[in-house]
Image (tube, coloured by chain):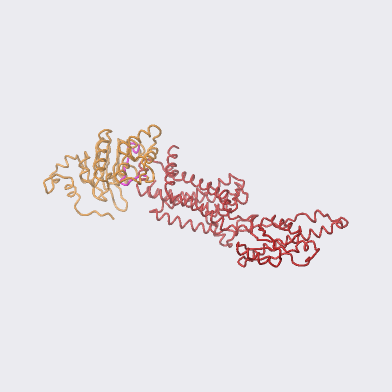
Amino acid sequence: MIEINHLYKSYDKPVLKDVSLSVRRGSILGLLGPNGAGKTTLISILTGVIRKESGCITVDGLDLDRELKAIQLKCSYVPQALAFYRLLTAFENLEYFGALWGLKGKKLKERMEFCIDIGSMQRFAKKRVDKFSGGMKRRLNLAIGLLNDPEILYLDEPTVGVDTQSRNYILETIRKINRERKTTIIYTSHYMDEIEQVSDDIAIIDEGKIILHGDKQAILTRDDAVNNFGHRTLEKLFLKLTDVRLRDEG
Amino acid sequence: MIKILYILKKEFLLIIRDIHAITVLFIMPAVFIMIMSLAMRDLFELHGAVSIDVLAVNQDAGKKSEAFLKAMDALRTFRFHLIEKEAAADKVADKIKEQMLARDYKFALIIKENFSAFVEKNGKGKDEKPLELLVNPAVNVQTQLVLKSALDGKLAKLTWDAFIDRMGSLLPLAGIDREKMTAAEESLVEVHYVYKEGRYSKIPSAVQQSVPAWLVFSMFFIVIPISNTFISEREQGTLMRLKSMNVSRFCLIMGKMAPYLLINAIQVIIMIAMGVYIVPLCGGTALTLGDSMGGLILIAASVSFSAISMALLIASAARTTEQATTVGGVLNLIFGALGGIMVPKFVMPGFMQDLANMSPMSWGLEGFLDIFLRNGNVSDVLPKSLYLFIFGVVMLTLTVILLRRRGEI
């Protein structure tokens, strides 16, 4: 479905160095990495927000350089930031972004209803977003990303700063979308347990390179995933692979 | 097209729910227009058909004093407030002085008992001065001279007419047309006000200066809401989301321009309505609009385009909302001070008028004045509109270059 080959990108210094990765159709790929590892840059390139320097990316056989528009119509990007308008209501935000996706009339209404429903926002859809709690805002951020019924959904840390209930609801929703609509999902997070919970495949990126990629079960059964208490955890493996030193950006 | 409509709706909702934007775009200019139109009324209106209040007492029993007051009223420069005359002539001065101070009049005029006798050169006191003017020492000499000249002029005319009346039977014998000799006098001096831009027969009244000046100023303050929205979109990742949605550059730029063009148009309508309907209710004069709707639309659209383009450049270049509002605010104040918004251009010395021509606010203000004051039309405002348009195109080009370089569009 998504094929990334020898991808390079640099700003002042190299951010992505020879990244190659494939994502299966209908799977959830958990993309892990410390701060500054290149996760957001990788997603930004895949969504056409920034341009790559070199390498080749195809989505469903379409070349990203030549057929970006067609690819973008299949995808949706839920940024880590709460990318909507705080002075508008949830309803108005959905209407605005839906219209920008080219939806109108009955179709727009249907998709908005679906998103309100999936975000469990029926009671507060007509309230201004600046009155929302953190969890409600995160659900709206996700719901906006589902307006175009995407085949591929990019989620950049979609549960940052929410309470346990909202987090659980968002993870359930992600699984539901994947299960029912066969949406391919690329999911970045710092929370290992989340990745363990929702992913089919896992990729770990560090210092611009993919250092581990494979099936979740295969990864979790590796010997180096056993912690001091004899339990198999992704965190143990992640720390071993990426080193325990702090990764302060700057 | 549907996308643009939803973008318009979104921007409108954002503005009407943003109290700061409403204050800057609508309340600030409305308050400025009201205050400046009223506060500067007397200063500006010495040039126009405006009244200087004069307290007056008429001690004369004859008809000539009434004719004199009527002639003075006809000048529409003075408004006489007559008080009851005193039986005892020696008490008149005291009473009028007392009223003058109590009611804060700058001038008081005593028309003495001998006024008609003086004019007709017949009767008691015909050779004594018939008028006494009391002046508040705070009044400037120029204003005193205006009133004194008007009084002298009207008195001379009345005396001349009375003389012609007395000579009535002799005039035909001398071959003089009596009608022409007594015709209502009209000033033979044609006045033009000259400054760097040219020469004009009228100077703006306070409201004619204030409405376009603060309107142009507030239109340029569109930088505040544009920066707020634009920088929030960037900081909150909305711009990134829009880019991932394949929203075209044209749509992104038009999505910023079109709503604010409409908001500027609403500002124009509201501020003009303030000048025409609200300011007169509070004692100021009404704004006159001129005859060229096309010219008004052209200059308003040009100011709007250049203001929005400049705002977009500032919003694109700034990293934070604080940076944008500070830079935008300071630039607007400089353009305003320089461009004749705060101090009318016609009172500036020559070199300052040259400097004023560098401010886009000055081009806009002069364009509006062409329409409101000088009965200008589309061709009169075309040069200023062209400057504003070129300025806007330059700003917009720089914005697009900057945004493309940063990969934001």
Q: Quadrant of residue B169?
A: bottom right
Reply yes or no: does residue A81 show up in magenta.
Answer: yes
Reply yes or no: does residue A69 show up in magenta.
Answer: no
Q: Quadrant of residue B68?
A: bottom right
Query: Considering only vertical position in the picture, is A144 above or below B128?
Result: above
> Where is residue B351 shown, x and y percent of the image?
57, 62
> Where is residue B275 shown, x and y percent of the image?
56, 50
Magenta segment: A71-84
Query: Considering only vertical position in the picture, is B125 above or below A109?
Result: below
Residue A50 visible: no
For image coordinates 43% across by 57% down, the residue present is B326
> Where is residue A131 shown, x and y percent of the image?
34, 46
For image coordinates 56% across by 56% down, the residue present is B38
In the rendered image of this protein, which colour is used for chain B? Answer: red
Query: Considering only vertical position in the picture, is B386 above or below B79?
Result: above
Q: Residue furthest front?
A: B87
> Where is residue A17 shown, x and y percent of the image?
26, 48
Q: Quadrant of residue B41?
A: bottom right
Compared across the picture, whether B195 is left or right of A203 comes to: right
Shown in orange, the chain is A
Compared across the picture, whether B117 is left or right of A219 comes to: right
